[in-house]
Image (spheres, rainbow, N blue to C red):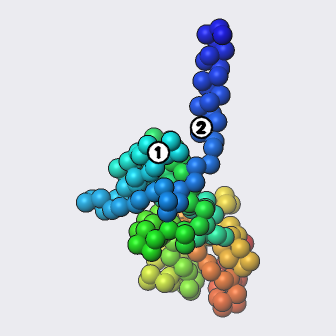
Amino acid sequence: MCPEADILEQEKKSVEDLIAIKPITADNAVFTRTEGGFVQLCLTLPGGETKTYTRVAVHRCFPHSDPEHYISIREPEGDGREIGLIEDLAALPEDTQEMLREQMALRYFSPKITRVRSIKEEYGYSYWDVETDRGACRFTVRMGGGSVYAIGANRYLVTDLDGNRFEIPDLYKLTPREIKQLDLFI
């Protein structure tokens, strides 16, 4: 085979390896907490060899519509290459579930807006003063740029200038006055 064909074959194998879904199950993975509070993974590969990842990042593939299924375990640095996928969190041991949920709670921290005190618009920005399940909060949102979007029936996600996310769990649990303030965004 010519050298160009070898390179092409290696690149093809590399791409196939990158896009292959590698299941992570209770049978092939052990998650532990490091001294620094990070999550470590010891994974048994298909050939029987084990590989230890001293730190992993935990991501939900469907954070709002299916938070307990399809959990992506990734390398935390670089391009965040996927190590594998947990199809159902409930299939793992309870202590592992708790550890991974804790990591996802940190990643997907999004206080729920329970009351809208005021929203003021000025110079292409809106200034929100709200009550959340975590207390009172003020934040700024860029106008006209997808900062507020639906994530379900009557459910919305608001992203502020700093990338913080706030959830409106049910628009119609707010008062008519509060809903009117949100009209411009929904």
**Res. 153 mark:** none
Q: CA distance from mark 2 to mark 1?
A: 17 Å
Which residue is situated farthest in the front direction here?
48
Residue at 53% in and 56% down: 24
Marks 2 and 1: which is nearer the front?
1
Name the amino acid type tagged 2. Answer: Asp
What residue is pinned by disc 1?
48
What residue is pinned by disc 2?
17
Name the amino acid type tagged 1. Answer: Gly
Q: Position of residue 25 (x, y in %)?
A: 53, 60
Residue 96 visible somewhere in the drawing: yes
> Pointer 2: residues within 10 angstroms few (<14), some, or many (20+)?
few
> Pointer 1: residues within 10 angstroms few (<14), some, or many (20+)?
few
Residue at 62% in and 80% down: 169
User: Looking at this view, is 170 or 41 the one in front?
Assistant: 41
Q: Report helix, strand or loop for mark 1.
A: loop
Q: Position of residue 37 (x, y in %)?
A: 31, 62
